[in-house]
Image (spheres, grey):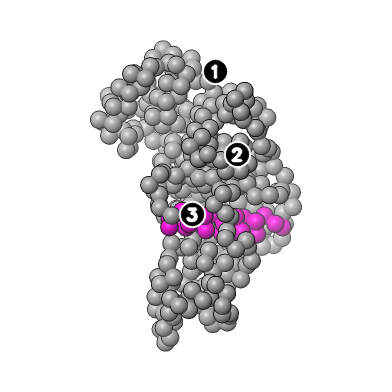
């Protein structure tokens, strides 16, 4: 747990040793000490445990928790990341996911009814496509035809936990895991714009629904993208709105209505045969020339999770645990707990009126 806690903070062993030495003042802590402590070759207790907790921003009780030694395991985690993301950053994300899972489990454990959920695995093959899986899940969950106004609410309503926090990198938008005997957990980067946030969440939903085990990376990523496109933009609903033809002005209008990026709408038009490869390339070139590949016009509101905040309210009402005690359950200081789980990385921006070219 000591190594996981350190990695979740993006610290090296040397970084942690320096921080602990500064906090202690009287005694220098070496990198070798940190290494031996993480390897279990010496016991960390009393004042030294308190020092560890202060340096890492977790409670001593959290640092004494037992978990699977290597966290969630790379093979059991799905993530929507860029190819340029390094191994160190990925380890930090996996450690953050592990600790987030432990925090969510600690908070929800007293509320036994929260183990029920509406998720199931849907097999895909040559006949049953990712689009079929998305349509099946929409039908099973009773999602209204047309745009999904609040994807987070749909997923939380099915029994999953959605947590939004700063993941310390712009290279990854979302990560998910479905542990045995627990509801799925979706961890989203608070720095992602609202349209990318929604598509990344739908992409992770596709992984959770379709992929029990890791497979060929590119194939699974393509399947998750296809699932996300159909889940957010069902073909029979979006096609009539794309068919009259699309230009940048129309893409802005559709972005405001469907809550997905102009680029995603253009790819959807290509996949549905509304535009040709040549038209698709021209639209993408035009968007790139205007800087839209970096920052698109029309702001989509980033959605806010409410499930864990509601859990904290129930803990207070049913178990007389106020938010300070809930923070202790999660192993966090009050301020960080409030920021992550009660403020829910509050939404930024709102759906704006489409700009005119």
Q: Which mark is residue 131?
A: none
Residue 320 appears left or right of 254:
right
Q: Position of residue 44 (x, y in %)?
A: 56, 78
Q: Nearer the viewer, residue 31 or 26?
A: 31
Mark 2 neighbour class, 10 Å CA radius: few under 14, some 14 to 19, many 20 or more: some
Mark 1 neighbour class, 10 Å CA radius: few under 14, some 14 to 19, many 20 or more: few
Please, is residue 76 above or below residue 106 in the view? above
Q: Earlier in the sequence, mark 2 or mark 3?
A: 3
Q: Earlier in the sequence, mark 3 or mark 1?
A: 3
Residue furthest right in the image: 112
Quadrant position of the N terminus in the picture: bottom right
Q: Earlier in the sequence, mark 1 or mark 2?
A: 2
Q: Tell me the residue that label 3 is attached to.
A: 93
Q: Which residues are magenta?
A: 88-110
- Labels 1 and 2 touching (C-beta < 8 A): no
Q: Tell me the residue that label 1 is attached to.
A: 236
Q: Nearer the viewer, mark 2 or mark 3?
A: 2
Q: What secondary structure is found at the residue carrying circle 3?
A: helix
Q: Tell me the residue that label 2 is attached to.
A: 211
Q: Nearer the viewer, mark 1 or mark 2?
A: 2
What is the CA distance from the residue labelled 2 to the residue labelled 3?
A: 20 Å
Q: Could one spot residue 291 in this view of the protein? A: yes
Quadrant position of the C terminus in the picture: top left
What is the CA distance from the residue labelled 1 to the residue labelled 2?
A: 25 Å
- Let me know if residue 109 is in the magenta part: yes
- Let me know if residue 245 is in the magenta part: no
């Amino acid at each position: 747990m000591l190594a996981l806690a350190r990695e979740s903070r993006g610290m090296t062993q040397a970084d942690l040793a320096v921080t602990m030495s500064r906090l202690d003042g009287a005694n220098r802590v070496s990198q070798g000490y940190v290494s031996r402590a993480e390897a279990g070759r010496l016991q960390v207790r009393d004042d030294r445990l308190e020092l560890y907790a202060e340096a890492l921003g977790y409670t001593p009780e959290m640092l004494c928790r037992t978990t699977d030694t290597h966290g969630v395991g790379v093979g059991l985690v799905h993530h929507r990341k860029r190819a340029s993301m390094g191994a160190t950053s990925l380890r930090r994300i996996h450690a953050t996911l592990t600790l987030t899972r432990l925090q969510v489990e600690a908070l929800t454990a007293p509320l036994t009814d929260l183990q029920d959920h509406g998720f199931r695995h849907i097999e895909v093959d040559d006949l049953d496509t990712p689009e079929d899986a998305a349509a099946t899940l929409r039908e099973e969950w009773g999602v209204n035809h047309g745009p999904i106004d609040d994807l987070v609410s749909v997923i939380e309503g099915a029994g999953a936990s959605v947590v939004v926090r700063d993941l310390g990198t712009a290279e990854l938008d979302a990560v998910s895991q479905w542990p045995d005997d627990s509801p799925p957990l979706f961890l989203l980067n608070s720095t992602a714009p609202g349209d990318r946030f929604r598509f990344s969440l739908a992409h992770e939903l596709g992984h959770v629904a379709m992929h029990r085990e890791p497979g060929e990376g590119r194939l699974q990523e393509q399947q998750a993208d296809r699932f996300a496109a159909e889940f957010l933009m069902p073909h029979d609903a979006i096609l009539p709105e794309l068919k009259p033809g699309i230009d940048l002005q129309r893409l802005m209008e559709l972005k405001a209505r469907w809550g997905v990026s102009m680029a995603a709408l253009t790819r959807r038009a290509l996949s549905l045969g509304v535009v040709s490869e040549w038209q698709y390339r021209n639209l993408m070139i035009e968007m790139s020339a205007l800087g839209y590949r970096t920052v698109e016009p029309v702001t989509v509101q980033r959605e806010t999770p409410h499930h864990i905040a509601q859990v904290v309210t129930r803990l207070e009402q049913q178990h007389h645990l106020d938010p300070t005690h809930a923070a202790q359950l999660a192993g966090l200081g009050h301020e960080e707990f409030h920021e992550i789980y009660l403020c829910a990385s509050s939404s930024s921006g709102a759906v704006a009126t489409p700009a005119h070219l």
